[in-house]
Image (cartoon, helix red, strand yellow):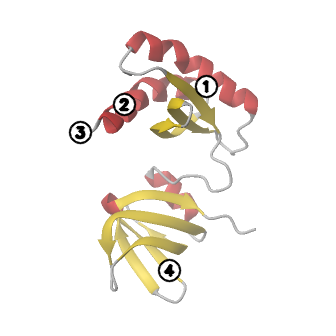
Amino acid sequence: MSERQTIEEKARAVCEPLIAAEGLELLEVEWSRAHEGWVLRLTVDKPGGRVGVDDCSTASHAVDTALDVEDFIPHEYSLEVSSPGLNRPLVKPAHFEKAVGQKVRLKTFGPIGEPPRKNFAGTLTGFSPESLQVQVEGAGLFTIPLKDVAKANLEPEL
């Protein structure tokens, strides 16, 4: 397991219950090197959406001390907490269930379908705990095993 994966998993384990106690949901954890240095990015949501600056501040304060106490991050870093925005990530099964009928963008770990592809943009037409179905305009219906989805987001229709 890479350092990035290890830090992201440990951060999720530490932060998720603390953020949940504040009435928020931890959607994504991202550990990356930015121009200014290392950054731990947390994306939070709440029932009904509309995460505001105060919610992000609450989540940041809820996890900041715990991350310092656990001390598993080997670099100096900045903590960023943000809302999911219009193209909110789809991470948990419940997220996919709610998104059926909406436009999505998916990336898979490896090529799927015929012709093989890793990127899919279309309408999420179905979901089960094992797979999801995406209707890609001009390419047809793709059934994608959930375990093969590397990243998924809603695609807002503007």
The numbered dot on residue 7 is 2
Q: Which of marks 1 and 3 is nearer the N terminus?
A: 3
In the rendered image of this protein, does residue 119 appear above or below residue 76? below
Q: What residue type is labelled 2?
A: Ile
User: What's the distance in space between the residues labelled 2 and 1, CA to CA?
Assistant: 18 Å
In the rendering, at what x and y percent does residue 154 appear?
Answer: 59, 61
The quadrant in which residue 119 appears is: bottom left
From the viewer's perspective, tell me whether residue 116 is left or right of residue 102.
Answer: left
User: What's the distance in space between the residues labelled 4 and 2, CA to CA?
Assistant: 35 Å
In the rendering, at what x and y percent does residue 158 appear?
Answer: 76, 68
Q: How crowded is mark 2: few (under 14 residues within 10 Å), some or many (20 or more)?
A: some
Q: Which of marks 2 and 1 is nearer the N terminus?
A: 2
Residue topped by disc 3 = 1
Residue topped by disc 4 = 135
User: What's the distance in space between the residues labelled 1 and 4, CA to CA?
Assistant: 36 Å
In the rendering, at what x and y percent does residue 120 appear?
Answer: 47, 72
Q: What element carries label 2?
A: helix
Q: Which of marks 3 and 4 is nearer the N terminus?
A: 3
Residue topped by disc 1 = 59
The numbered dot on residue 84 is none
